[in-house]
Image (cartoon, grey):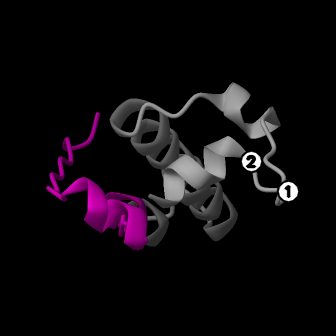
Amino acid sequence: MGPVVRAQQVYRSDELAERRVDLAVVDQLVESGVFDKRVRLQLELAFQEALSNSLEHGNLELDSAWREEIDSAGVDRYSLTRAR
């Protein structure tokens, strides 16, 4: 078994919502040949989706059912609440 690689990054919620998080450990795994670029992209997308879900449903407490509640202007409650 090889060495254990650990990485820690600290961000505020508003910083995460506005930027793409660099996953240095994934870059290292691609460079070492453990993953190819296709797997790297899949990992980055999965991480961004998990991060987005945690921000929207955890921090902002948005309910997915609000996507079905459309106002007279055609905008859903979820998007309106998220934009505030």
Total number of numbered discs in the rendering: 2
Q: Is residue 34 visible?
A: no
Furthest residue in direction front, as rendered: 72
- Inspect the image, locate mark 2, and give the three-letter code of the amino acid beneath it: Asp
Q: Quadrant of the N terminus?
A: top left
The 10 Å Cα crowd at callout 1, few under 14, some 14 to 19, many 20 or more, is few
Q: Position of residue 75 (x, y in %)?
A: 77, 55
Q: Can you say whether 54 is above or below 17 in the image?
A: above
Q: Can you say whether 75 is above or below 56 in the image?
A: below
Q: Is residue 16 visible?
A: yes
Which residue is rendered at x = 21% and y = 48% of the image? 5
Label ID, residue 37 = none
Q: Quadrant of the C terminus?
A: bottom left
Which residue is rendered at x = 20% and y = 41% of the image? 4
Q: Overall secondary structure of the magenta stretch?
A: loop
The 10 Å Cα crowd at callout 2, few under 14, some 14 to 19, many 20 or more, is some
> How far apart are labels 1 and 2 at the CA level?
7 Å
Which element is circle 2 on? loop
Q: Position of residue 81 (x, y in %)?
A: 53, 48
In the picture provided, is 57 more to the left or to the right than 46? left
Q: Are marks 1 and 2 in contact (CB under 8 Å)?
A: no
Which residue is rendered at x = 71% and y = 26% of the image? 65
Label ID, residue 74 = 1
- Nearest the viewer among 56 and 37 is 56
Label ID, residue 76 = 2
Whether 20 is among the magenta residues is yes
- Inspect the image, locate mark 1, and give the three-letter code of the amino acid beneath it: Gly
Which element is circle 1 on? loop
Segment colored magenta: 1-28
In the picture provided, is 58 more to the left or to the right than 73? left
Which residue is rendered at x = 51% and y = 39% of the image? 53
In the picture provided, is 84 more to the left or to the right than 49? left
